[in-house]
Image: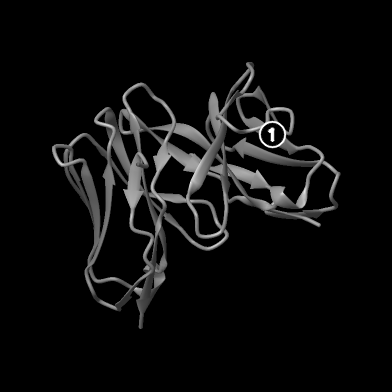
Amino acid sequence: GAVVSQHPSWVICKSGTSVKIECRSLDFQATTMFWYRQFPKQSLMLMATSNEGSKATYEQGVEKDKFLINHASLTLSTLTVTSAHPEDSSFYICSARVPIGGGSGYTFGSGTRLTVV
Amino acid sequence: QKEVEQDPGPLSVPEGAIVSLNCTYSNSAFQYFMWYRQYSRKGPELLMYTYSSGNKEDGRFTAQVDKSSKYISLFIRDSQPSDSATYLCAMRDNQGGKLIFGQGTELSVKP
C-alpha cells in the first residue's frame, strides 16, 4: 500500500518551454506532498511543501514563479517547470506523508528525469 | 555544518560481508529516523523507520539510533549484489516537519 505514482519518468524539452510533472497517491489520501530535486550523486533537496487546497510553501532560494505547484485534490499534486532552461535539468521526486505504525513516514514517487535542451 | 552528515562513499564490499552505514546529526529535536534505499534513476524506498533511540531489526537489516551521541546506523548482514544502491538517512522533528536527508552512501556489493 501507500503508493505514489509519478509521471512522466523522463522528459526532454526545449529551452523556454514548460513541463508538468504529476504525482498521484493511488491508495491513500495525501494531504501533504513534498517536491524534491536531486542532482547526480547528491542528496534530495526539498523544493516545496504542498498542502491540499492551499498555497505551497517554498524553501529558501526556490523560485515560486518558476516552479509552480498545484495540489488541488487529495490524490494529485503537480509541479510545473516554467520557461525551462538547461540548468533546470535534474531529477525531480515527489513524496507524500503516510501513517506508519502510529507515527508517520514518507513514500516517494519513482522520479522524473528532466532534460532541457 | 550540515544538519545531517553522511559519508558519501563509495563503499565496496564482497558478497556476504556485513555493511555498516552511519549518519551524524546536529539537531537534538530530531525524533524520527529513517533509512532509504535508492537505485539509480529511481525514487527512494523506505527500508527502516525508528522513533527515538533504540534498535530495530527487519530481516538482514538493523537500524540503531543513539540520540545521546546524535548518531544513527544501518547494518546489513549477509550483503547481496542486489543490495548495491545508494542508502540515504533521513530524519525529522516531532512537529511533523520536513525530512532532512544525508548525502547518501553509494554501496557496491561484489559477487
From the viewer's perspective, tell me whether residue B37 is left or right of residue B68. Answer: right
Q: Identify which amino acid the numbered label 1 is placed on.
A: Thr
Give the vertical position of A16 relative to B87 (above or below).
above
Find disc 1 in the rendering and name its residue.
A78
Image coords of residue B97 (percent x, y)? 41, 26
Image coords of residue A85 (percent x, y)? 78, 47
Looking at this view, is B22 or A5 the one in front?
B22
Image coords of residue B17 (percent x, y)? 23, 74
From the viewer's perspective, tell me whether residue B56 is left or right of residue B86. Answer: left
Residue A30 appears in the picture as rendered? no
Looking at this view, is A11 or B3 the one in front?
B3
From the viewer's perspective, tell me whether residue A53 is left or right of residue A98. Answer: right
Q: Chain of mark 1?
A: A
Position of the C terminus of chain A by quadrant: bottom right
Looking at this view, is B27 or B99 the one in front?
B27
Residue occupying the point 55% across, 30% down = A59
Give the vertical position of B72 relative to A2 (above or below).
below
Give the vertical position of B52 relative to A51 (above or below).
below
Give the vertical position of B79 relative to A109 (above or below).
below
Question: What secondary structure is marked by label 1?
Answer: strand
How many discs appear? 1
Residue occupying the point 44% across, 31% down = B98
Residue occupying the point 50% across, 46% down = A44
Furthest residue to the bottom?
Answer: B111
Residue B2 quadrant: top left
